Image: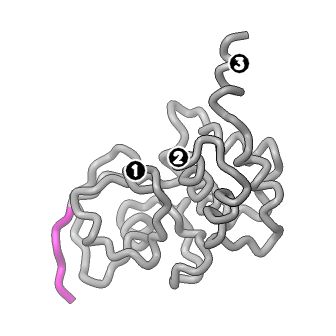
């Protein structure tokens, strides 16, 4: 098993890493960078619990992505959403709308939800459904998740700050 040097920026921090040919992005996030919020589920890309966002804000299944493909790239994990100790608007919405159950899939679902609103600031039902199609939650359906996604966080946050 060959080892290679790579540079990866995770949540704004740059890491110089030694990785093998077979390591996935999930392996690097959890085992090398030591961020445990990104979960290991099916390891086949079918459940979505390992979802992270790339530099364009798109959802990426880290369990089926070879780490070496990400040399020089930037990603965001669930830990990277909060800024200055303040939860991201999507994280707040998940709490507010009860969109969390056992919590195992929650990081991947939130990262998928972020990817949806990054692409469609006012997503339609069809866009939400398509964005959540690869995310499985064994505790409940996506009803509460969809309620959290539908919120216009920017307007709500701006109104709060203006008062």
Residue topped by disc 1: 56
Residue topped by disc 3: 159
The answer to whether 61 appears left or right of 92 in the picture is left
Residue topped by disc 2: 118
Residue 32 vs residue 112, the one in the foreground: 112
Quadrant of the rendering where the C terminus is positioned? top right
Residue 145 vertical position relative to residue 49 in the rendered view, above or below: above
Mark closest to the chain's N terminus, 2 or 3: 2
Place of residue 159 in the rendered image (x, y in percent of width and height, measured from the top left): 71, 18
Residue at screen point 69% across, 73% down: 136
The answer to whether 87 appears left or right of 83 in the picture is right
Place of residue 79 in the rendered image (x, y in percent of width and height, measured from the top left): 51, 49
Residue at screen point 25% across, 73% down: 19
What whole-number distance in Å separates the C-alpha atoms at marks 1 and 3? 27 Å
Identity of the residue furthest to the top in this view: 163
Residue at screen point 33% across, 53% down: 74
Region of the chain picked out in magenta, as a range: 1-6
Mark 3 residue element = helix
Mark closest to the chain's N terminus, 2 or 1: 1
The answer to whether 18 appears left or right of 55 in the picture is left
What whole-number distance in Å separates the C-alpha atoms at marks 2 and 3? 20 Å
Residue 95 vs residue 2, the one in the foreground: 95
Mark 1 residue element = loop
Whether label 2 touches label 1, CB < 8 Å? yes
């Amino acid at each position: 098993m060959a080892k290679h040097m790579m540079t990866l920026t995770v949540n704004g921090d740059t890491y110089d890493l030694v990785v093998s040919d077979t390591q996935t992005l999930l392996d690097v996030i959890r085992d090398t960078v030591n961020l445990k919020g990104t979960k290991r589920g099916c390891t086949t890309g079918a459940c979505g619990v390992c979802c992270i966002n790339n530099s364009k804000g798109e959802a990426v299944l880290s369990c089926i992505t070879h780490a070496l493909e990400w040399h020089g790239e930037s990603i965001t994990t669930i830990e990277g959403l909060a800024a200055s100790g303040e939860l991201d608007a999507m994280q707040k919405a998940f709490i507010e709308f009860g969109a969390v159950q056992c919590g195992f899939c929650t990081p991947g679902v939130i990262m998928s939800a972020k990817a949806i609103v990054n692409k469609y600031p006012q997503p339609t039902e069809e866009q939400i459904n398509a964005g959540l199609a690869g995310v499985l939650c064994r505790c409940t359906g996506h009803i509460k998740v969809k309620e959290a996604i539908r919120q216009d966080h920017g307007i709500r946050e701006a109104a709060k700050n203006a008062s």
